[in-house]
Amino acid sequence: MKVHLYQIQYDEKTKPSEESGFSAFDVRDKPEFLKREMAHWLRFYEEVISKSDDQNAVYGLFSPKFNEKTGL
């Protein structure tokens, strides 16, 4: 089973670092601030998960503040 971890990227400051293990899910072209993360979850599902050939893969979409919020 493959695990794919993504971090939402709103701008250059929220680009995930290479050592974080996250891939960028770039929403700079459609930030949709008023809809908050729900808009990004729906778009992530449509653009990434629904197009995956691996039915056993696991996906995660994380906030740029994940480490700050969790202390991890």
Image (cartoon, rainbow, N blue to C red):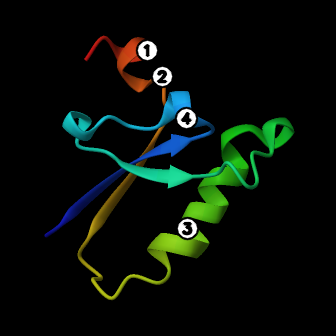
Vertical arrangement, residue 67 with respect to residue 46, above or below: above
Q: Quadrant of the C terminus?
A: top left
**Outermost residue to the bottom:** 53
Horizontally, residue 34 falls left or right of residue 37, namely right
Residue 60 placement (x, y as % from top left): 38, 51
The circle drawn on residue 45 is 3
Q: Which residue in the rendered view is the most extreme toward the front? A: 12
Residue tagged 1? 69
| Marks 1,2: beta carbons within 8 A | yes
Task: Name the amino acid type tagged 3.
Answer: Tyr
* Res 44 → quadrant: bottom right
Q: Amino acid at mark 2?
A: Lys
Kind of residue sitting beneath label 4: Glu
Q: Secondary structure at mark 4?
A: helix
- At x 72%, y 52%, the residue is 39
Q: Looking at the image, how many numbered discs can be counted on the residues? A: 4
Dot 3 or dot 2: first in sequence order is 3
Q: CA distance from mark 1 to mark 2?
A: 6 Å
For label 2, the residue is: 65
The span from disc 1 to disc 4 (Cα, nearest Å) is: 20 Å
Distance from disc 3 to disc 2, alpha carbons, whole Å, reads 21 Å
**Extreme left residue here?**
1
Question: CA–CA distance between discs 3 and 4?
Answer: 23 Å
Q: Is residue 53 above or below residue 66?
A: below
In the image, which is nearer the foreground, mark 1 or mark 2?
2
Q: Nearer the viewer, residue 56 or 69?
A: 69
Q: Nearer the viewer, residue 15 or 46?
A: 15
Front disc: 1 or 4: 4
Location of residue 38 in the rendering, given as x and y in whole percent from the top left corner = 69, 47
Decide if residue 21 is on the left or right side of residue 15: left
